[in-house]
């Protein structure tokens, strides 16, 4: 079913076809910029280019590159230095993860501390409950 939406780039009213949130005009522009980026990355000497190098060489919008990575149009396994930044520290993420290894470790440690605190508080409540009902 085709839903009326506002284009994500130019905000004009358009009909959504598939997953795209762009009007036909912006979709053509998006595809042209994507081809420019992919042509640059496909060159042997540019396969390990970083986001900054791609931005400087192609003059494409940085958010568009991140969007293409999220949508799977640019595959990180083919271009290892092109990826999404960690939302906490900004480090380049590996394929398919939402936090870098360092931030993930901090998150797990904090979660374990919270569980430990809750476990201690739970023991107090259990002990009080058992004393009252013995």
Image (cartoon, grey):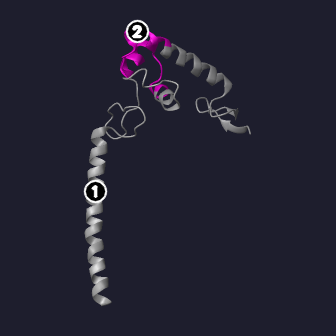
What is the quadrant of the N terminus in the image? top right
Name the secondary structure under disc 2: helix
Identified at 32% across, 32% down, the residue is 91
Q: In this view, does 84 lie to the left or right of 68?
A: left
Residue 44 is marked as 2
What is the quadrant of the C terminus in the image? bottom left
Magenta stretch, overall SS: helix
Q: Quick one: label 2, few (<14), some, or many (20+) residues within 10 Å? A: few
Identified at 49% across, 32% down, the residue is 70
Name the foreground residue: 73 vs 127.
127
- Residue that carries the numbered disc 1 in the rendered image: 112
Farthest residue to the front: give it: 134
Report which quarter residue 21 is drawn in.
top right
- Find residue 71 and report its horizontal and vertical position in percent: 53, 31
Identified at 27% across, 80% down, the residue is 127
What range is drawn magenta here?
39-65
Report which quarter residue 120 is drawn in.
bottom left
Q: How far apart are marks 2 and 1 (CA)?
A: 45 Å
Report which quarter residue 5 is drawn in.
top right
Residue 48 is covered by the magenta coloring: yes
Name the secondary structure under disc 1: helix
- Find residue 23 and report its horizontal and vertical position in percent: 66, 28
- Find residue 100 and report its horizontal and vertical position in percent: 33, 38
């Amino acid at each position: 079913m085709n839903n009326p939406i506002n284009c994500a780039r130019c905000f004009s009213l358009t009909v959504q076809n598939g997953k795209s949130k762009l009007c036909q005009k912006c979709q053509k522009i998006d595809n042209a910029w994507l081809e420019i980026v992919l042509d640059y990355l496909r060159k042997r000497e540019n396969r390990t280019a970083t986001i900054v190098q791609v931005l400087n060489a192609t003059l494409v919008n940085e958010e568009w590159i991140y969007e293409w990575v999220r949508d799977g149009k640019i595959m990180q396994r083919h271009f290892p230095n092109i990826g999404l930044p960690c939302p906490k520290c900004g480090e380049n993420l590996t394929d398919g993860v939402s936090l870098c290894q360092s931030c993930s470790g901090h998150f797990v440690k904090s979660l374990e501390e919270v569980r430990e605190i809750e476990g201690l508080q739970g023991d107090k409540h259990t002990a009080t409950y058992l004393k009252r009902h013995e």
